[in-house]
Amino acid sequence: MDIPTKEDLTALSEQGEGYAVSIYMPTHKAGKDTRENPIRFKNRLQEAEEQLRRHGLKGDDIDALLAPARKLDDYRFWQNQREGLAVFVQGGSERHFLLPYAPDELTVVARRTHLKPLLPLLTGDGRFFILAMSLGGARLLEATRYSVTEVPVEGVPTSLEEALQYDDPEPFHEHYTVTAANRGGEALVQGQGAGEDERKTNILRFFRAFDNGLRALLAPQGDRIPVVFAGDKGLFPIYQEANHYNGLLDRAVEGNPEGLREEELHARAWEVVEPHFRAQRERDAAAFGEALGTGRAGTALEEVLWAALDARIATLFVPLGERAWGTFDAEARRLERTDEGPESYDLYDAAATYTLLYGGTVYAVAPDEVPGDGPLAAVYRF
């Protein structure tokens, strides 16, 4: 399956009937080491069996619960892995995700799915867009630190040639899909027979039309998600003139993107956007420090959990790799810290999950990178 999205997180966070089994493990992608993948997975399933027995389940019930996961034990499946694997089983169904990083080995049996190891894919230092622009073709790619996928953009011209077919390019009534860049874009422009001013005017016309489509696509998300421009150096200032999306970064990936593979384009774009994410995280940590003591920030686990359930958290820092077991009743506002057990749940996981579901930003960081003196740090919306 693809890398999990926020929609996947929503589905997985819903508490089903019976126990939920969550398995995380690193995997090998190629070579003889791939033989270790099924062995490691069987060990994780054995750990799940032992936990389920301790929780009071009998052999037949355990077999029925884990049966969907056992179907993954297939040679072809283990030969097509990435750096890590996440498997979730509950109520007779199974979902799995191939992860672009290697998580710590972990098996959790609880009433809810354990999601915190997925947070590096969904947190505040992850999602951005790459606008790969040439005069012969345009592509829009959605990316995280670990992944990149081309996104169709409809209703806009995909090249300068298409843009110049219309007397009034805004709006375009025909529907188009951004495709892989066509060759010969520069030759097309040079062949127009126009002077430099007319050439720039035509390019600006194309870029404005594309910007209209881009803004329509990104409008539901505001201007929060950064966009990295990738294109020839001379095109970037023209696109900046046409641009009306506040998330466009000032730095660009320079050079014609037509000859770049997605992986190479993604790596170069990450070099541009990573300082932006780091600076935003530092600003959010500073905002926590300013809000602390004013009633607009918190570090106590119980207070932060209720705030997450009430959709009050704007920003949350949680310690990746640590767990705080307990049970909670949202309606009764009752929380009890416990040892890991059949009814317990990682309360850090719950706080992070609900913060994300209600539109907050979550940073899953090393414990010593959580700002303040508490186990976690939250900035409240109100």
Image (cartoon, rainbow, N blue to C red):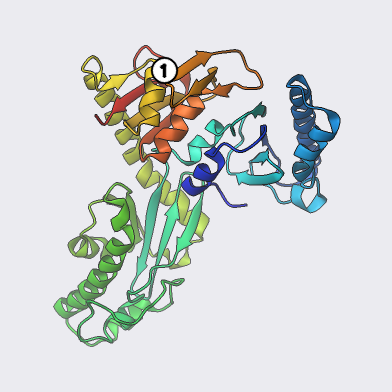
Image: 52 above or below 11:
above
Residue occupying the point 37% across, 76% down: 136
Residue occupying the point 81% across, 49% down: 74
* Left or right, 88 with reference to 76: left
* Left or right, 80 with reference to 357: right
Residue 11: quadrant of the picture: top right
Image: 253 above or below 24:
below
Image: 176 above or below 3:
below
Between 148 and 16, the one nearer to me in the picture: 16
Residue occupying the point 22% across, 52% down: 246
Q: For the residue marked with disc 1, what is the amino acid?
A: Glu
Q: Residue 320: image x %, image y %?
A: 51, 25
Q: Residue 17: image x %, image y %?
A: 64, 37
Outermost residue, right side = 59
- Crowding around mark 1 (Cα neighbors within 10 Å: few <14, some 14 to 19, many 20+) is some
Q: Residue 315: image x %, image y %?
A: 33, 31
Outermost residue, front side = 332
| Residue 233 seen in this snapshot | no
Between 233 and 374, the one nearer to me in the picture: 374
Image: 42 above or below 375:
below
Residue occupying the point 35% across, 31% down: 310
Q: Residue 215: image x %, image y %?
A: 27, 61
Residue 332: quadrant of the picture: top left
| Quadrant in the picture for the C terminus | top left
Marks counted in the figure total 1
> Badge 1 is on which residue?
302
